[in-house]
Amino acid sequence: MKSGWPSFWLQGQKPPLWARLLEVLYCALIAVRRWAYAQGLFKTTRLPVPVLIVGNRVVGGTGKTPLLMALIPLLQAQGWRVGIVSRGYGRKDKRVRFVKADSTTDQVGDEPLLLFAQLGVPIVVGSNRVAAAQKLLAESPVDVIVSDDGWQHWALGRDLVIEVVDAARGYGNGHCLPAGPLREAVPILPNAHLTLYNGKDFSLKPQCWRNIKTGECVSLANLSGRVAALAGIGHPQRFFDTLVALGLTLDKSLPLSDHQAMIAADFDWDDASLPVIMTAKDAVRCAHFARSHWWALEVTTEIDHDLLLPVIERIEYLLSMKRED
């Protein structure tokens, strides 16, 4: 799984029989759970502010974090106070807590820490998104809550859903887990208000190299030749391809599992003879033991803001309705 999906998850592939049998069981369990929420057997909590879900119906990374980097400033430009709730995948501390400048990835996870550093908005992490959202509202009043993922967290009522899809991999073979990458069977997939494709509707534009130890940013032209690269994201090859497109030669390329924890001992192969390149998300997991020749590729998200106009209009409508109430 370190290099991405199992081969039989890819488009045009047929899953093995054992996976198809387990798929039937998994999909049935999800269908029953979804039905229980629809019938009110399980509680859905509605909040006094609009809740926007940014998620994906397939497992693995699709580009939610880069999209949030572009979306949140656009929401703020409308004069809205925005807060984020997130599970904080991979963290060891299970408390519901705010992300702070001195938080660690063990406490809050890598993506929330990266989002806080880049956006500066209030972020609360917790596996229970209802509790996280309530803590956010109680201690840092906001006009709009954005849930980083939460596609299947039906306990938190949602007003708007943005689905993010990796344009290169799409929905894979179209099967449900574990026969394919879908979290739910096709007939019961929740409808997204907007679907955006990473690599088509929006893309990442490299900006500079940031030294992970010192924080210094230098021009892309400052690094050339042979490098060692690692990527602990949903689709590592996308990152490696970007480095090659920038003219670098990958002497080593190490795909890691998404959100994989890292310690200094994991870099025993590093002899300082090559610059080590990683994503900004990887960098937050090893910043406290970084060496002077480690660099993160800083990127910006390029997207036509017209694509996000339906989101703005929907939130404006929801806020107007809540003001009338």
Image: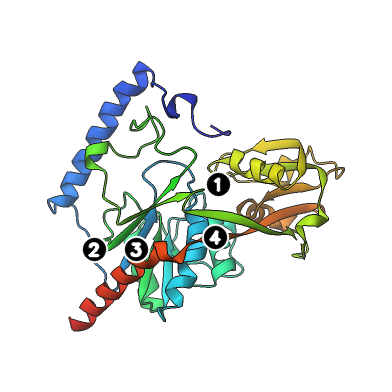
Q: Disc 1 marks which residue?
A: 259
Q: In the rendered structure, which disc, 3 or 2, sits on the residue that comes first in sequence? A: 2
Residue 272 rendering spot, x and y as whole percentages: 85, 45
- The front one of 143 and 269 is 143
Label 1 to label 3: alpha-carbon separation: 23 Å
Q: Residue furthest top?
A: 17
Q: Is residue 108 visible?
A: no
Instruction: Single out the mark in the foreground, 3 or 2.
Output: 3
Type of residue at label 1?
His
Distance, label 2 to label 1, CA atoms, is: 29 Å
Q: Point out which mark residue 45 bears.
A: 2
- Distance of mark 3 from mark 2, alpha carbons? 14 Å
* Amino acid type shown at disc 3: Leu
Q: Give the camera-side residue of 296 and 169.
A: 169
Q: In the rendered image, which quarter is residue 23 located in?
A: top left
Expressed as whole percent of the image width and height from the top left, the position of residue 84 reads 43, 66
Q: How far apart, in angstroms, are the residues tagged by discs 4 and 1?
A: 24 Å
Neighbour tally class for label 4: few under 14, some 14-19, many 20 plus, Cα within 10 Å: some
> Residue shown at 73%/46% (left/top)?
264
Which residue position is annotated with label 4? 302
Label placed on residue 52:
3
First-in-chain label (2 vs 1): 2
Kindly identify the amino acid type of the residue bearing the numbered disc 4: Glu
Direction right: furthest residue: 273
Amino acid on which disc 2 is placed: Thr
Which quadrant of the rendered structure holds the C terminus? bottom left
Frontmost of labels 4 and 1 is 4
Left or right, 169 with reference to 34 = right
Foreground residue, 8 or 287? 8
In the picture, measured across the screen, residue 87 lies left or right of residue 40, that is right
Percent coordinates x, y for residue 184 in the rendering: 30, 39
- Rendering coords of residue 266 (x, y %): 71, 40
